[in-house]
Image (tube, helix red, strand yellow):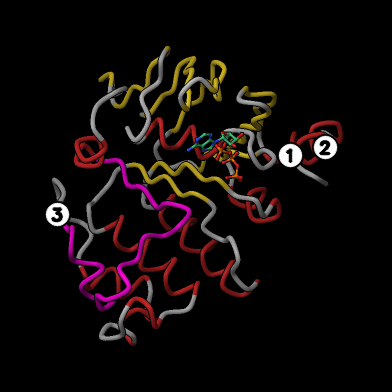
Amino acid sequence: MLQVDNIHTYYGDSHILHGVSLKVKAGQVTSLLGRNGAGKTTTLLTMMGYLAPRQGSVTYKGQNISGKPAHRISRMGLGFVPQERGVFPSLTVEENLTVAARPGKDGRWTLARIYELFPRLKERRTNLGFQLSGGEQQMVSIGRALMLNPEVILLDEPSEGLAPLIVQEIVEIVKRLRNEGLGVLLIEQNLGAALELGDVHYVLSKGQVCFVGDSETLRNDEAVLSAHLSV
Ligand SMILES: Nc1ncnc2c1ncn2[C@@H]1O[C@H](COP(=O)(O)OP(=O)(O)OP(=O)(O)O)[C@@H](O)[C@H]1O
């Protein structure tokens, strides 16, 4: 569905991604792991069109999307939940959710369905962005991406800084999205959550993929766990 082939991405003269390739399939969670600075966020930003790869390509449903502007890529069906969450502080929860909403082909995600997925957001729908907890902000950020009716959703460290109970809530939400047939690409520092969720894991090191495999294979690969995942 979404495929990255041999991308090389730079920040100015700094060569960050050295030939990263990966695939995101519908109805699966693809996890992207690796130490700080390994290139995970850079990979997502390249896929979403915020950075243009100097070499290689990003293909979505057979179409080369590398170098297309981010707003067009998002309109094609790629939802993005950035690490910094991007909640507008002076808008209400409901305004944050609807500000960029757009019906998809089958208009599946509506405000009512987002509130069913996140009952807490319904309770807080008139609260302003700056009044929300970290977990609630993360829910708004995921809900807002869903309101664009994506077929693939890219999540950059959704559990970062959240209490364990909220992390578990986010894990359950990601499972539901996968079960609804979305393709999910997940950057996750919480290895337990990543192992629970990931159908396939890619481990990045210095801008290159150094491991691809399922949770069981990763759990048993002590060399990769200790060298690249601080376990
Ligand atoms: N705007 C930028 N300008 C220059 N270098 C950058 C920029 N953003 C990131 N980098 C560098 O690119 C490398 C990869 O960063 P990236 O954010 O992709 O890593 P990451 O694996 O997502 O790690 P983290 O968990 O810290 O976000 C790092 O060495 C980082 O210092």
Badge 3 element? loop
Label 3 to label 2, Cα distance in Å? 43 Å
Q: Is residue 190 left or right of residue 120?
A: right
Mark 3: give few (<14), some (14-19) or many (20+) Cα within 10 Å.
Answer: some
Mark 1: give few (<14), some (14-19) or many (20+) Cα within 10 Å.
Answer: few
Nearer mark to the viewer, of 3 and 2: 3
Q: Position of residue 131 (x, y in %)?
A: 39, 83
Label 1 to label 3, Cα distance in Å? 39 Å
Q: Position of residue 230 (x, y in %)?
A: 80, 45
Please tell me whether the stretch drawn in magenta is mainly helix, strand or loop: loop
Q: Is residue 231 left or right of residue 122?
A: right
Residue 98 among those drawn in magenta: yes
Which residue is under mark 3?
A: 102
Image quarter of the N terminus: top left
Residue at screen point 60% across, 49% down = 188
Q: Position of residue 43 (x, y in %)?
A: 48, 32
Query: Does 35 appear above or below 5?
Result: below
Kindly identify the amino acid type of the residue bearing the numbered disc 2: Asn
Label 1 to label 2, Cα distance in Å? 6 Å
Which residue is under mark 1?
A: 216
Kindly identify the amino acid type of the residue bearing the numbered disc 3: Arg
Kindly identify the amino acid type of the residue bearing the numbered disc 1: Glu
Tag 3 near tag 2, CB within 8 Å: no
- Which of 189/24 is in front? 189
Residue 50 among those drawn in magenta: no
Badge 1 element? helix
Query: Does 102 appear above or below 26?
Result: below
Residue at screen point 69% across, 24% down = 210
Tag 1 near tag 2, CB within 8 Å: yes
